[in-house]
Amino acid sequence: MEVRVAEKRGFCFGVEAAIELAEGALREHGPGNVISLGPVIHNRDVVSKLERAGLIQSGDLDRIKPGSTILIRSHGASPRLLEKAHQRNLKIIDATCILVKKAQEAVRTLHEEGYRVVVIGNVDHPEVQGILDYAPNVIVLDHVDEIDLRLPERARLGIVAQTTHSPEHVGEIIGEIAKRPFQEIKIVNTLCLEVVRRQQAAVALCAQVDVMFVLGGLHSANTQELARLCREQNVPTYHLENKSQFEASMVTGRKVAGVTAGASTPEWVLTEFVEHLRSIPE
């Protein structure tokens, strides 16, 4: 089978840095002596590999023994959690993506400047959850129909976005907000350019293929967004974590397959999948 791979795909610098920090912490402190506060990144293959190397995962700070070494995931953490970690005398290794840090600081600054902070994003996503405590009364919305329900009339709004969202989605919501009579709107661009480039490459590839595969964690926001954008191009699209989820029926009657991968998907997962597709007779 003919297979074409997106020019931009896979690991971004933030994910690479988080994995390097996790691996370095394990070398320094030894297996079983580093605790990650949740998955380091949203990819089960990578998380499982780190766990086999001795990284412990916990979502409950209260159960971690004082003096232990903890790893802050790439999605970041709230100021309250970090302060609590300090109070418990925990040694902190911060793997927060630098662009997530930018979003956190933007929220803090906008509040200090007197704006009511609005985050365009998924309220349940760990990045957004971490951002919320950087200012009081932060409003989170992710759909146009939430604007009139959640935004106070004639307020001074300071807007940021979840780093993994697409510019089109964020732009649509901001455009609708701008139609309302708010006193003032200040926008800080917190979108990740690496994620945007992967989105653009995936959309471009859709025009060349008759089936599309998006590889990455099923809970990965940026991978979900890649799959959504590909489906919008009216190309049959499958979001899979790895080769094990592939079924031959997915390519029945298809001649050219496109493959891309989310920003937290390792290259070896993509390579293994592509090799498997290319071994299928035309």
Image: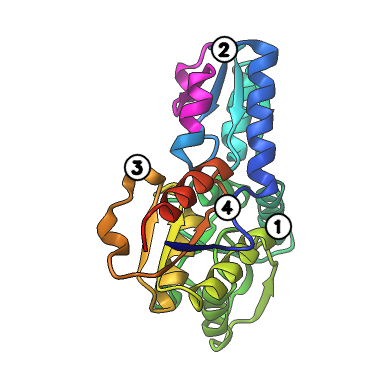
Vertical position of residue 31 compared to residue 119: above or below: above
Label 4: how many residues lie within 10 Å, few (<14), some (14-19) or many (20+)?
Answer: few
Does 113 sit above or below residue 219?
below
At label 2, the amino acid type is Pro
Q: Which residue is depicted at the point 62% across and 38% down?
A: 79
Along the viewing direction, whichever of 97 and 256 lies nearer the viewer: 256
Q: Secondary structure at mark 3?
A: helix
Q: Give how far apart the Cα atoms at labels 2 and 4 are.
A: 39 Å
Q: Is residue 153 magenta?
A: no
- Residue under pointer 4: 136
Looking at the rendered structure, the secondary structure element under dot 4 is loop
Asked if the residue at tag 3 contacts the one at tag 1, i.e. Cβ–Cβ closer than 8 Å, the answer is: no
Disc 2 is placed on an element classified as: loop
Answer with mark 3 or mark 4, whichever residue precedes in sequence: 4
Where is residue 8? Give x, y as percent. 63, 60
Q: Which numbered dot is residue 244?
A: 3
Amino acid tagged 3: Ser
Which residue is at the front of the view, 121 or 211? 211
Mark 1 residue type: Ala
Q: Is residue 76 left or right of residue 255?
A: right
Q: Earlier in the sequence, mark 1 or mark 3?
A: 1
In the rendered structure, which segment of residues is drawn in magenta?
A: 47-66
Q: CA distance from mark 1 to mark 3?
A: 41 Å
Q: Which residue is mark 1?
A: 106
